[in-house]
């Protein structure tokens, strides 16, 4: 059994209202979860449901209004936690945001990737190695000397990921990191995320509103109005299409098609959660049986 990496207990956050008092409607309310080392979790929710607030609390950009967060064994609410502890924990939890252009700081790709470890005071030969490894991991090595602003969205986002990788995080949070990308860029980033999780055992939290992305995770947490609505495997979560629709979400298209065909009495063997190929196979099988 893997160790817990993130534990939250009744985690609650209210932004300040116009008078500077904590708003009576919290952006996040009583979120108690455990995410283990090496897990790949998708967080789903409609706009304004509290996903980014959750991410910022886990990355220590925001401080809880109420409740506790324990990261990698350190309780953030403990009295004897130091600035250095927070700095070190931030290194262990990397965050990739939505807009790749806002995350790149240097004019050459490899300098951008070196920026984080340079700030950590890492020796330069070690930085060289980390930058090369990180660029190779995200598949960008051939662009090391290029100018980031000339790259595609997917490539830029992979440079941003490499910059975090070079700080050797244990967990990475992606806050709608594919939302501004074209389908090719999205695919590149999703493949990279999967590789980080499977090959380097990096704990992944992928915040998204694409159902097709959520299916790729081992676990899906649905947030609605700041509270956890469902927490389960993709199969468990997407077997509740009516509940999802009631909070402004849908199920992946293939799942929707399978569920609709079943509702019309067509017998389809297998899981609801399926990719395009498996979906086509299921339907072909059903047709073949009908014609036989
Ligand atoms: N800086 C802010 N000040 C006040 N309210 C905010 C701020 N950021 C977000 N909110 C509010 O908090 C709620 C959750 O927002 P957010 O966490 O950004 O949701 P999501 O990422 O799911 O779209 C929303 O009602 C939003 O309007
Ligand atoms: Mg958001």
Image (cartoon, rainbow, N blue to C red):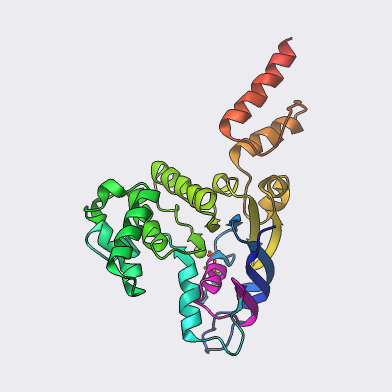
Q: Quadrant of residue 203?
A: bottom right
Q: Quadrant of residue 222?
A: bottom right
Q: Quadrant of residue 215?
A: top right
Q: Nearer the viewer, residue 233 or 72?
A: 72
Relative horizontal placement of residue 68, taking residue 97 as reference (left or right):
right
Q: Nearer the viewer, residue 206 or 108?
A: 108
Q: Residue at x 52, y 57 (%)?
A: 202
Residue 105: x %, y % from top left: 28, 66
Q: Residue at x 40, y 41 (%)?
A: 184
Relative horizontal placement of residue 189, taking residue 66 as reference (left or right):
left
Residue 173: x %, y % from top left: 51, 62
Q: Is residue 137 visible?
A: yes
Q: Nearer the viewer, residue 176 or 156?
A: 156
Number of numbered discs present?
Answer: 0
From the image, which quarter does the N terminus lie in? bottom right
- Asked if 216 appears above or below 225 in the picture, the reply is above
- Asked if 286 appears above or below 18 in the picture, the reply is above
Q: Residue at x 51, y 71 (%)?
A: 59
Q: Is residue 26 visible?
A: no
Residue 207: x %, y % from top left: 54, 58
> Which residue appears farthest toward the top when viewing the image?
292
Q: Residue at x 51, y 86 (%)?
A: 82
Q: Nearer the viewer, residue 186 or 7?
A: 7
Residue 230: x %, y % from top left: 71, 57
**Does residue 55 belong to the magenta stretch?**
yes
The residue stretch that appears in magenta:
52-73
From the image, which quarter does the C terminus lie in? top right
């Amino acid at each position: 059994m893997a160790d817990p990496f993130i534990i939250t207990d009744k985690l609650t956050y209210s932004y300040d209202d116009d008078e500077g008092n904590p708003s009576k409607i919290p952006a996040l309310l009583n979120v108690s979860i455990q995410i283990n080392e090496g897990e790949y979790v998708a967080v789903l929710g409609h706009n304004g449901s509290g996903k980014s607030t959750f991410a910022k609390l886990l990355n220590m950009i925001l401080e809880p209004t109420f409740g506790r967060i324990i990261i990698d064994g350190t309780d953030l609410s403990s009295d004897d936690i130091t600035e250095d502890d927070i700095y070190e924990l931030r290194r262990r939890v990397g965050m990739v945001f939505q807009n790749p252009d806002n995350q790149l700081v240097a004019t050459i790709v490899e300098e951008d990737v070196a920026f984080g470890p340079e700030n950590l005071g890492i020796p330069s030969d070690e930085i060289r190695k980390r930058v090369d490894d990180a660029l190779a991991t995200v598949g960008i090595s051939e662009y090391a000397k290029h100018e980031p602003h000339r790259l595609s969205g997917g490539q830029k986002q992979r440079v941003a990921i490499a910059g975090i990788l070079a700080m050797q995080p244990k967990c990475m949070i992606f806050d709608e990191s594919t939302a501004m990308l074209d389908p090719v860029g999205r695919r590149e980033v999703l493949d990279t995320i999967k590789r980080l999780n499977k090959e380097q055992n990096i704990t992944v939290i992928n915040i998204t509103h694409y159902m097709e992305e959520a299916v790729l995770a081992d676990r899906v947490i649905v947030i609605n109005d700041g509270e956890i609505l469902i927490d389960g495997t993709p199969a468990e979560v997407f077997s509740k299409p009516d509940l999802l629709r009631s909070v402004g979400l849908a199920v992946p298209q293939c799942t929707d098609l399978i569920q609709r065909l079943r509702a019309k009495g067509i017998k389809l063997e297998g899981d609801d959660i399926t990719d395009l190929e498996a979906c086509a196979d299921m339907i072909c099988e059903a047709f073949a049986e009908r014609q036989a």
